[in-house]
Image (cartoon, helix red, strand yellow):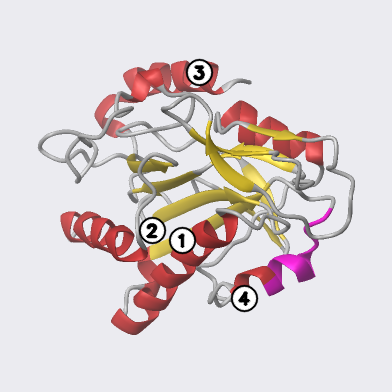
Amino acid sequence: MDRRSYLRGTVAVGSILGAGCLSTFRDSGPTVLDKPEWRRAESEALSFPAFDQQLPEVTLPSPLHDREVTTTEFNSERHVLVTFVFTRCMGPCPVLTSNLAQVQVDAAENGYEHEIALLPITFDPQFDTAERLRTFSADRGADPVADNWQFLRPPSFDRAIDVVNGIFGVGVKKTETYDQKSREGHSDTQTDGDQQSTEHDGSNAPFVHIVLTLLVNRDGYVERAYDGSNTPTPAALIDDLETVRNGFN
């Protein structure tokens, strides 16, 4: 199922369930944060879930915790941060993962670790074993075995593409060097002046992919979709999360 079909389905279900569903709408809608002002803010123009849309539901293995995780299982309990990475990445992926790790550290220091779930998703399961995910997380400053850190790993590359491309609408494509086992780098480039992507530049990058982090409130609605045009600093991400948390207190 592609993401736009998924969204049509969730809209239809929402219309049927009405006020009886999980969502507790704010005065101005299902989100705490105001509509973002940056360009590309119109949710319907984007392939991936964006402001005031619901987080897609998908179930994937969480090998560091030896269980399956459903992205919507935290509804009504935790705010969620989701990003899409692979550990061979030498470009944005370490930064995206480090951002989530710094949120985890701030949560532990300030006593809200049980209010959040951090869900990095790899789209390179052939290479990203549980041990690699553990090491990559720890190297970025995360506690990989904490219950709020669930590094999700699809069981196959085909399933990864189905989830990341099809369900989440986050463009990722393997390059001709995908099957190489050495750690190779890749760099960021602007593809169309509007959308940030990682590009194969001759340095044997395994993938081209869209840069994206989603901040989702505990009712399951996207508060922010930070793509390559507006990647936040850790401080800005923590500030946005704090505003969302306060809106639910």
Image vertical order of residue 96 relative to residue 1, above or below = below
Is residue 64 something that shows in the picture?
no
Q: CA distance from mark 1 to mark 3?
A: 25 Å
Residue 78 - label:
2
Question: Earlier along the polypeptide chain: callout 1 or callout 3?
Answer: 3
Which class describes the residues within 10 Å of circle 4: few (<14), some (14-19), or many (20+)?
some
Residue position marked by numbered label 4 in the rendering: 139
Camera-side residue of 237 and 163: 237
Q: CA distance from mark 2 to mark 4?
A: 25 Å
Q: Are marks 1 and 4 in contact (CB under 8 Å)?
A: no
Q: Residue at x 35, y 44 (%)?
A: 230
> Which label sits in the foreground, 1 or 4?
4
Which class describes the residues within 10 Å of circle 1: few (<14), some (14-19), or many (20+)?
many
Q: Position of residue 9 (x, y in %)?
A: 48, 18
Residue position marked by numbered label 1 in the rendering: 117
- Say what amino acid the circle numbered 1 marks: Ala
